Image: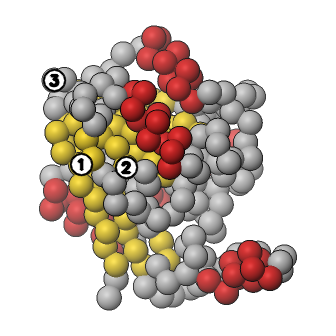
Amino acid sequence: MVKDHLSDFVKKYHIDFVIANGENASHGKGLLRHHYFELIESGVDVITLGNHYDSKKDIRRYIDRVDRLIRPLNLTHEYPGEGSAIYDVNGVSVRIINVLGSAFMNEEVNNPYYSLLELFSIEEATINIVDFHAEATGEKICLAYALDGKVSAVLGTHTHVQTKDAKILENGTAFISDVGMTGYANGALGFDKDTVVGKLMYGKSDPFQIPDEGKGIFSAVVLDIDENTGKCIEIFPIYYLEK
């Protein structure tokens, strides 16, 4: 879906910079090196991760050798790579940050809000976009309100279903609870529905499978951000389903 359709959306909406959460890109969990490069070659400018950041051990060998891959900022343990990076986009400094939520997640993490405040005190950027990879919509909106006016956008990821609450908060921060999934459409979490139902409903231990063919879905949001103030002017979703 990314290879076939991303360039069309970039042209249609005059996109300057593309961010993709790639933590499920390699067979549903993690990101292998060759998939990282496939996404970059397809037009993605930077890739963020999430709770499956370490699911493919291959990442430890290459994450410090590439400059467009961002793992969670608020890990409690030492891990290669960086939790944020600043990019020059047509003369404007754009910082992309990846943060894990603390509610209903298995990973032990530092407080996402205070981790972000600490980061902001170290280095400034005009535009700051936060990929908040979290389970609870309540935690996502609370972080967005707490950061309203401090960042350009708080974009929720992780639950694989695009939410209908894209908006700009009072002080210019864009928000959506979940950007949604790009992948196999007629299943569950991007997997073949029978394998997911078998595990969650019937207690089977078979691994989730991704079908070789079927309809795809492309979910995203478009942000229009003032390059002088860093405040978001507009946010709207893309929800494209193959026929």
Q: Please, what is the three-letter code of the amino acid marked with disc 1?
A: Ile
The residue nearer to you, when weighing 158 against 228, is 158
Lower position in the chain sequence, tag 1 or tag 2 = 2
Quadrant of the drawing holding the C terminus = bottom left
Q: Given this view, does label 1 or label 3 mark the residue nearer the observer?
A: 1
34 up-or-down from 118: above or below:
below
Q: Which residue is mark 3?
A: 228
For marks 3 and 2 on the same chain, the one whose residue lies earlier in the sequence? 2
Mark 1 and mark 2: Cα distance apart in space: 9 Å
Left or right position of 24 against 6:
right
Q: Tag 1's secondary structure?
A: strand
Three-letter code, disc 2: Ile
Q: Which disc is residue 62 wearing? A: none
Q: Are marks 1 and 3 in contact (CB under 8 Å)?
A: no
Give residue 200's position: percent from left, percent from top. Answer: 74, 75
Q: How is the image coloured?
A: secondary structure
Residue under the image location 55 percent in, 73 percent down: 190
Residue 48 visible in the picture? no
Q: Which mark is residue 235?
A: 1
- For the residue pair 77 and 31, the one nearer the viewer reads as 77
Whether residue 184 is situated above or below residue 134 in the rendered picture: below
